[in-house]
Amino acid sequence: MNCATTDSELLQQLSGIPEIDLCGFSVREGLSGRGVTMHKGRSYFGSWRAAPNGELIWTFADLNEPGRTVATVEEAVRYTLLLILRNLENKSDSAPKQARAG
């Protein structure tokens, strides 16, 4: 499978998951016409790019965080969903606790 096909397949699979948009994230083709770019709201969250050997490489917006390399599109989808869940979990952990009535 060539890089363009891997990128296209990943974009197609992620675009087919409506919960990504419902959580405030979006996916689109990379600026260079290759790769998959992910945004959280209007902010860049990270991106996938295909290596010549067919692996997919994740790079966070914060380059201090370690990236991730996976062998298949399915693993990239799974990891992307995990990143979204972790982000939502961190967001709910940092939200101020409301006083309970009663």
Image (cartoon, rainbow, N blue to C red):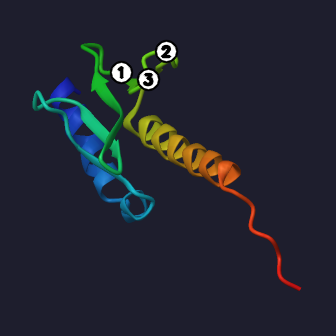
Question: Total number of numbered labels?
Answer: 3
Q: Which kind of residue does numbered mark 3 sit on?
A: Asp
Q: Position of residue 7 (x, y in %)?
A: 23, 34
Q: Position of residue 16 (x, y in %)?
A: 31, 59
Q: Which kind of residue does numbered mark 1 sit on?
A: Glu
Name the residue: 70% across, 50% down: 93
Q: CA distance from mark 2 to mark 1?
A: 21 Å
Residue occupied by mark 3: 62
| SS state under label 2 | loop
Image quarter of residue 59: top left
Using residue 44 as the reference point, say whether residue 33 is left or right of it: left
Residue occupied by mark 1: 55
Q: Is residue 39 above or below residue 57?
A: below
Q: CA distance from mark 3 to mark 2?
A: 5 Å
Query: Which badge, 1 or 3, comes first in the chain's sequence?
Result: 1
Give yes or no for contact between labels 2 and 1 (Cβ–Cβ under 8 Å). no
